[in-house]
Image (cartoon, rainbow, N blue to C red):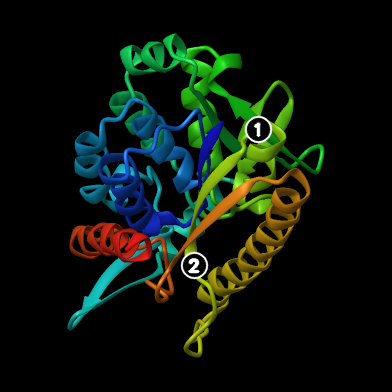
Amino acid sequence: MRALVISGGGSKGAFAGGVAQYLIEREKREYDMFLGTSTGSLLVPYLAVNDISKLYDIFTNVQQQDIFSVSPFVQRQKGDREFVSIDFVNSLWQFIKRKRTFGESKALKRNIRKNFTFEEYQKIKATKQDVVVTVSNLSMNRVEYKSINDCSYEEFCNWIWISCNYIPFMSLAKVNGYEYADGGLGCVIPIREAIERGATEVDAVVLESESLKKQKILGKNPFSLMINLFGHLMDQVERNDIVIGKLAAKNRNVKLNLYYTPTTLTENSLIFSKRLMEKWWQQGYEHAEQKHE
């Protein structure tokens, strides 16, 4: 059984799309399982139905308003550099309303329902393929994996959305009395889960460079520093996931192919720029091509 696993990484998911396109179209890889965390959860359903052109159009055209119903960020451009700063008005308004997060991502939930159709859900269910998304159950302090084969269409769309909810900047979701958030808070790249589910070969796309090549610039206020802190913590989780995945692959005699980004794509993956994401998609395709050459 062959599995494709895609890590979390916000807008950097465009790079994973390029890698996956090369593997599926040029290498003719056929996968029995697709597993994703956060942005990876957005990608895997379209890869499972092999509709890469639709995925490219959706992913490279996404904007802040397609994700946030209440955005905690303001996107700015200075020369060729794009960056985000905190929207203090929206954040303050969230406090006034006694919300527990700085922003809300209900727009993303609507867009998932709009773009991932019931017909595509049925197509996946009709095949032997399995699509699995990662979520963090904060109430029970555990990571959970939600398979499309165990969910209705409504439930699965909801789990995809929950897997992407990067708190405290996005919505905190409640299901059956438990509170859930971004799967990356517990497992950024579920390599071991793919192996536990029977994969004998795993292609894993890691949306970080294998080693840090330049010094990070930390935020100049408490909010932007918080973004840096969360990024640092998730980087550590990701490295642990990869170590655990490598050990599991070695113990089970599973072939593990890792695809890292060749460079650090961005310091803030909450920037959604069409120009950058089109560039990263092409870089992902070319990187996979070079790796196989």
Rendered image: mark on residue 29: none
Residue 49, above or below 71: above
Residue 69, placed above or below residue 102: above
**Residue pictured at 61% horizontal, 15% vertical:** 150
| Amino acid on which the number 1 mark rests in the picture | Tyr
* Residue 278 seen by the camera: yes
In the image shown, does 217 or 289 lie closer to the viewer? Answer: 289
Find residue 101 and report its horizontal and vertical position in percent: 57, 51
Q: As drawn, is 252 to the left or to the right of 163?
A: right
The residue that mark 1 highlights is 145
Q: Quadrant of the N terminus?
A: top right
Q: Residue at x 23, y 44 (%)?
A: 56
Tag count:
2
Q: Vertical placement of 179 versus 74: above or below?
A: above
User: Which element carries disc 2, helix, strand or loop?
Assistant: strand
State the CA–CA distance, disc 2 to disc 1. Answer: 22 Å
Give x and y (percent) for residue 31.
45, 32
Q: Which residue is mark 2?
A: 208
Instruction: Tell whether 227 sits left or right of 21.
Output: right
The amino acid type, in three-letter code, at marker 2 is Glu
- Badge 2 crowding class, 10 Å Cα cut-off, few under 14, some 14 to 19, many 20 or more, is many
User: Where does the image place residue 143, in percent across and percent down from the top left?
Assistant: 72, 41
Determine the residue positioned at 69% across, 45% down. 192
> Camera-side residue: 289 or 220?
289
Front residue of this view, candidates 213 and 76: 213
Residue 168 in the image, given as x and y percentages of width and height: 58, 54
Residue closest to the eye, 229 or 216: 216
SS class of the residue under badge 1?
A: strand
Q: Earlier in the sequence, mark 2 or mark 1?
A: 1
In this view, the residue farthest toward the bottom is 215
Mark 2 in CB contact with mark 1 (< 8 angstroms): no
